[in-house]
Amino acid sequence: MKLKTIARIHTDFTSKFGIPRQSGLVDELEATIVFEPEYRNPDALRGIEEYSHIWLLWQFSECADKEWTPTVRPPRLGGNKRMGVFATRSPFRPNPIGLSSVRLLGVEKTEKLGTILRVSGADLLDGTPIYDIKPYLPYVDSHPEASNGFALDEKEGRLTVEFPDELLKKIPPEKQAALKAVLAQDPRPGYQNTPERVYGIEFAGFDVRFTVEGDKLTVIKIE
């Protein structure tokens, strides 16, 4: 079976570092889904606006040419403990396919790009190929009693973010809340905990530099 790219998502992340570890962790993140020309038939989206959430089936495009491995080291377990690839959401899989649930914010008709979707909570790199879109059905897709295994179970930010006003003003107002929420999730791998180390993420065209000490993240530079 040959999978076809039906659309691409456009997000504020141009590199992997800093992307939330799961979809839905940062509701403030907004993105747009633009369909490939051959799939811009508006009839294909008829009725989708009646759903509040949708599933995205997509390609780990940055890892598509990498070999899969039966065990991986989940960053949130410190990077020194191996778990089975099928017990994780690692991108290094036999088929590099990702699955994300996102909130559907709106359906818009445009002159140049046809009908596009606006979504929030996506955990995808800018330009990621989308293979399929399906409606999220809470009566079968939601399992509040489910066990989360060894994955972290908190959704709220783990860090307090200190963002000096003079630096925050460099970020467009409509992007500020999303950036602070992303930083609060602690973008670092679990095995990195060096207070003097300077980290950086690329977000919405900006290079955001920060340090972390204890449970406080401090933004020190914006380029």
Image: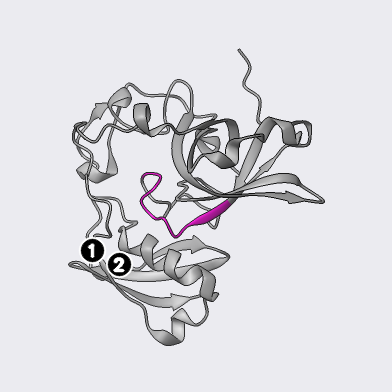
Residue 14 in view (yes/no): no
Q: Locate residue 173, reporting x and y percent.
A: 52, 76
Dividing the image into 4 quarters, which one contains the N terminus? top right
Q: Which label number is shown at residue 48?
A: none
Q: Secondary structure at mark 1?
A: loop
Q: Secondary structure at mark 2?
A: loop
Residue that numbered label 1 is attached to: 194
Q: Locate residue 71, reporting x and y percent.
A: 29, 25
Gap between marks 2 and 1, in whole Å? 5 Å
Between 120 and 170, the one lying in front of the other is 120
In magenta segment, residue 23: yes
In magenta segment, residue 39: no
Three-letter code for the amino acid on which mark 1 is drawn? Thr
Residue 192 in view (yes/no): yes
| Residue positioned most to the bottom | 166
Between 200 and 105, the one lying in front of the other is 105
Determine which quarter of the picture holds residue 195. bottom left
Which residue occupies 37% across, 83% down?
Answer: 164
Please state if 130 lies on the left or on the right of 95 as rendered. right
Q: Is residue 108 above or below residue 77?
A: below
Between 109 and 1, the one lying in front of the other is 109
Residue that numbered label 2 is attached to: 197
Whether label 2 touches label 1, CB < 8 Å: yes
Highlighted range, magenta? 22-31
Q: Locate residue 130, reporting x and y percent.
A: 59, 35
Q: Main secondary structure of the magenta part?
A: loop
Three-letter code for the amino acid on which mark 2 is drawn? Arg
